[in-house]
Structures are given as C-alpha cells and as structure tokens.
Image (tube, grey):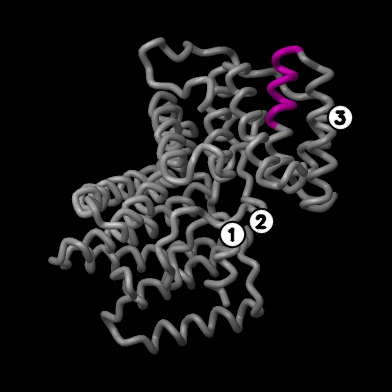
Amino acid sequence: QVARARAQLAVWPSSARRRRVVAPPAMAVPPVLRRLARPAVQVWTRAAPALPVVLPAPAASTSLRRRMASLPPGTVDDDGRSFTANSYISLGAFETMGGDVGRMATGIAYLEEAVRMQEAEHASEADPRRRAARAVGLAQSLLQVGRQHHQQQDPQEAINHYERATNLVEEALAFRETESQGNVKARKALEYCRFILSEICSSNGVAYNDVGREDDALAALQRALALRKETVGNNHPSVAECLNNLGAMYFSRGALQKAAEHYEQALDLLVAAAEGRQEGAYVALTLYNIGVCRSGLGQMEASVTALKRALRIAEQALGSEHRQVELIRETLRQGPPPPPTPKRPVEEGQAQPDANS
C-alpha cells in the first residue's frame, strides 16, 4: 500500500518493483514547496513528500519491518535491486513523513542503510547490464537521501549525495548508450536513465543555489531542462518543474524579465496539460512567482492580478490555512519584497536556454 501510494506522487519511487517508464506520473498531487534562501520566489523540489498512506502509522511501520525481516538475503527484483534494500527505502520514506525531526532522522538512518547495502551489491556485481541497473537503483536511493538532507536545511550534505548519484547514472548511461544501438528495450532503459539524471540535476541545481554556487546551479538546471525535454518532449508538463527552477535561478541573479519568461512558459505547460484549466498547487505556485517578478519589474497591475489568482487557486487546492496560502496572502497584504540586486549577467558564450526553452 505504501508503494502504491508513492506511485501517485510526482516523484520516481525508489522502492517497490516497477517497470521502466519514460514519462513521469501525472502531476496531480502538489509537490512539497520549499523556500529558497531568498524568500521572494518558490522553487519546486521533491524532498520528502508527505505520503498518503492508508494504514495508521504504527501498523504500516510494523508491517514494513516484518516484511524486511522476512525476506531472504540477496533477493533481487527485475532491475537487479535488493528487495531487502527496497524495504529499507520504503521504511525510510515512511519514517520521514511529516515534519517531525525525530522521525525524519530515523527515516534518514533507514535510507542510509539501504544505500550501504546497494553500494555493496553494486561494487560486487560483475555483469555489466546488472551493474548498470544497480547503479541507477543506487543513484535513486542517493537522490532520496539527498532530498531528506535538503529538507532539513543541509544543502551541502544533499550536494554530496546528488553528486554521487550523478556519477552513478553517468556510469549507467555509458553502458546503455552502447547497448541501445538497434535495441528497443535498451533504448527505453537509456531514456529512463536520462530522466533520472534530469531529476538529480534539478535537485542539485537548487542545492548549489542554496550554497551560493550560482554558476554550478545554472549549469545543472540547464542540463536538467535539456535532459527532460530530450526524454519526454518539449510540451510535457514535467518540463514545467525545470522551467520553474531555472526561473528561480534567474530571479536570484536579479534577471527578473528572464525569470518571468521561464515562469510563464511553465504556466503555459501546466494549463495545457489541464486542458486549459488553471487549477492545482503547481499553477498557484507558478502564478505566485510570476506575481513577484512582475512586481519587481514595476508592473504592479499584472503582479496583483497574478497574486490574486494564485491565492484563489491555492485556497482551493491546499485549504485556507496552508502555509503556502498564508505566504501568498501576506504578500498581497504587504506587497512583494524588493527584488534581489542584479548580479553579473549570463555571459554571451555561456550555455543558456534559447527563447523557446
């Protein structure tokens, strides 16, 4: 039940047996929204989503522990991942629900144990195909642990995990690219690796920004966007996440017009995916970001319009007492804070998205 619940979220679950699928799940469930170092804009992250678990907490946790203890050592799934390690991941993800610091610490301990087991399995695997599969599974676990550290305001520790995850997926990509020549199944595995890498780059870009490594942040977020488009196409709604995070990066540099353009591209994708409807927390978040940018550009009428729409949609999606709703309401009452001081612009020769990115 936990694995099935996790599959409903806009995040690739690291536990549970699953088929290789290129496109991510539909973005029907709001992401966890985390504030950037600068409080004016919101960045989409997937750190520690609150799981809609059916069982009460004690029953679910006990059930997972029993399952973990009952599995024979070394049992692996179709992708070469250990069921025992996956049980640790499931239990770790369960323990990190909510904002309880003690439970989050316990959850990270379970996740770290899963990582240690997967590292040993990956290191001892001689078959290249299974080693590549283990590398991707281990990278997903590292991504999940990194997100937990990121949620606990430890971006440097998150970066350590994200960078290890990046190296592992790139190892798997090198094998998959060679194997995929004329092989449809291997081609799908290659696309899956690229999508996972886009998720890692997106999370890493946000963390780089949090520790002040702005050039690294921009490069990682641009790479995430390029990989996401290559994997799912330019118009898939999951591309909106990458556009939003790039917008936040440009906002932090004081490039408000470029930030607004990226936010508006993200909004267009979300609305198109909802058949023209403006609804849901993703749309509210994006409208909020647009409103803040337009205020910084001196376009107050456009800013207020976007913020009011963001508030109405957020109240419907999250409830009037949600902290994100309070943030939007307070911004409307007091006005957005002053925009950040512009920093050096992106240089001409530096890689950056074009007008259609």
* Residue matched to label 1: 9
Find out whether residue 328 is within the magenta segment: no
Amino acid bearing label 3: Arg
Label 1, label 2: how far apart the Cα atoms are: 6 Å
Picture residue at 17% right of the left edge, 67% below the top? 125
Label 2, label 3: how far apart the Cα atoms are: 28 Å
Asked whether, in this view, residue 141 is left or right of residue 177, the answer is right
Amino acid bearing label 1: Leu
Mark 1 in CB contact with mark 2 (< 8 angstroms): yes
Extreme-bottom residue of the structure: 70
Residue 239 pos. (x, y %): 54, 40
236 lies above or below 3? above
Q: Residues within 10 Å of mark 1 (few under 14, many from 20)?
A: many
Q: Earlier in the sequence, mark 2 or mark 3?
A: 2
Q: Which mark is residue 172?
A: none
Residue 140 pos. (x, y %): 39, 57
Helix, strand or loop for disc 2: loop
